[in-house]
Amino acid sequence: MNIPSKPASIDVETHGNFIDGREVEAGNGVMLDVRNPATGDVIARIPNSTAEDIDRAMKSARAAFEGKAWGGMDTRARARLVNKLADAFEANLDSLYRLETLNNGRPVNETRAQLSRLPDFFRYFAGVALARRDSVIPVEGAYLNYTLRTPIGIVANCTPFNHPLMILCKSLAVVLATGCVTVVKPSEYTPLTTLKLAQIFTEAGLPPGVFNIVLGLGQSAGKMLSEHGDINKLVLTGGTEAGRIAGSAAAKVFAHQTMELGGKTPVMVFDDFDVDRAVNYAAFGAFIGAGQTCVCASRHIVQATIYDEFVEKLQAKTRTIRVGDPFDANTQMGPVISARQRDRVLTYVGYGHEDGARLVTGGVAAKVPGHDNGYFVEPTVFADVTSDMRIFQEEVFGPFTSVTPFKDEADALRLANNSPFGLAAAIRTRDVARAHRVAASVKAGIVWINDHHRLDPASPWGGVDDSGIGRECGTESFNDHFNTKSVMVATHEQPFDWYRDTANQQRLN
């Protein structure tokens, strides 16, 4: 797809699934529209995959996993190929970030910044693959005990609309570096960059069948992929209820699982931290990606001594954010992904009013000249929010944040941990001891101290409770893509006959 710098119109392309290194026809003839969320225009059409389509992709993946071209590739050759794929990604960065902006509505400045870091994931895991060591385990007696790790097999990956390539690459990089294979079901809203990346990687030398894509709706294609009997691991990023459904299906075939689900990130702002800096982080944490991220800074919990100042300055800062055409370099926030998501955000505005919160700014659909059918929402801030309100407890997934006062450290932690979620948390303080103390006590899998949204390929990423299980990134993710085999070698030459001399022999089994 050729994307001009500021597309006024674009040809509507029809895509199929990507299997065995090429696009193939799929579905039963009913096509799904893919829309530009900034205009509402249809930009592509994709199939809704059937059970036969899913099975075809799985068979392709299994054949690649067991075949010589991929399954027989040694570690160093595979690491060189993964590094080559990183180079190919960088060479196509301009077309990828523009296509991402067209498909999910994030401003070009955001997509360029985010996508430019993704080759690092491939290079990091290629390095881990070269550096990894199996264990030699000291055991009692004249034995050599060591472990062998073998790639786990087929990884089914269901990715969301908010960060199509970033969330894909967190999984894809480790899949390729470990010698696994994957079948990806991207969001039906944002499949275009995933298809483009598969084409780029195939042209760069990735063997057919290693990276397959099935398109369609989550409740049908995604469900069939998750419950397919031949998957060995399920990776899913999405809502908590979707995770429960997919995870239950995958558990029936005893597949490993990594799930990054919902979140309601608490940001605890203490009065020893610079208020202006805290406000700048608040705007970034809450409104980057139009707030459509599981780690959105959605609950600001602010010490009472600076509460009024924080609210006033956050109001002023939020009103300066330029909402507009994502292809305009001056735009700072684009649309949400769909009319349905826009309506969800506005529904929570209604909940805020009903429950007695104070609307500080925003709370309405935004008007963008020339984009009358786009799905824009003004960045929204509610103050005087209490922990029993729906906007404090439930994930909105849009440009929406709340502010709640607290008295002391214990009160801040009580409020922060009053949530079914436990993905990320953030702390704003200059007190080093307090920072570490609160980080240890807050319920979260990721904690930022005096920062937000920071991600690194080497740092484990994931949550607890309703925010999911398992970890992406780091050696934690790498190790979970292997089956571990223990090999016990007797190095002695002693005679053995249990049934002749049972009473004098000592064994653990």
Image (tube, helix red, strand yellow):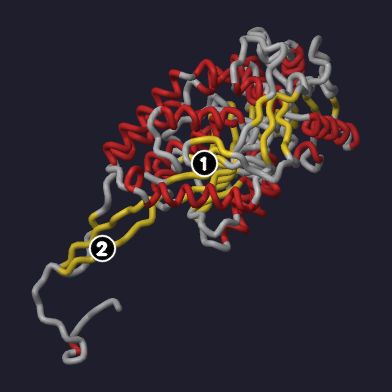
Q: Residue at x 47, y 37 (%)?
A: 21
Residue 469: in sight, yes or no?
yes
Q: Position of residue 59 (x, y in %)?
A: 49, 52
Name which residue type carries label 2: Val
Q: Is residue 434 above or below residue 272?
A: below
Residue drawn at (73%, 10%) of the image: 320
Instruction: Find residue 191 and report its horizontal and vertical position in percent.
Output: 62, 32
Left or right of 290, for residue 117: left
Q: Amino acid at mark 1?
A: Ile
Q: Which residue is mark 1?
A: 19
The residue at 55%/25% (across/down) is 450
Which numbered disc, 2 or 1, marks the residue closer to the eye? 1
Q: Secondary structure at mark 1?
A: strand
- Residue under the point 64% across and 15% down: 276
Q: Is residue 267 visible?
A: no
Residue 266 quadrant = top right
* Residue hosting label 2: 487
Relative to the observer, which residue lies in front, 410 or 263?
A: 263
Which quadrant is the C terminus positioned in? bottom left
Q: In the image, residue 58 lies at what x, y percent?
A: 51, 50
Mark 2 crowd level (few <14, some 14–19, many ≥20, 10 Å Cα): few
The residue closer to the viewer here, 351 or 312, is 351
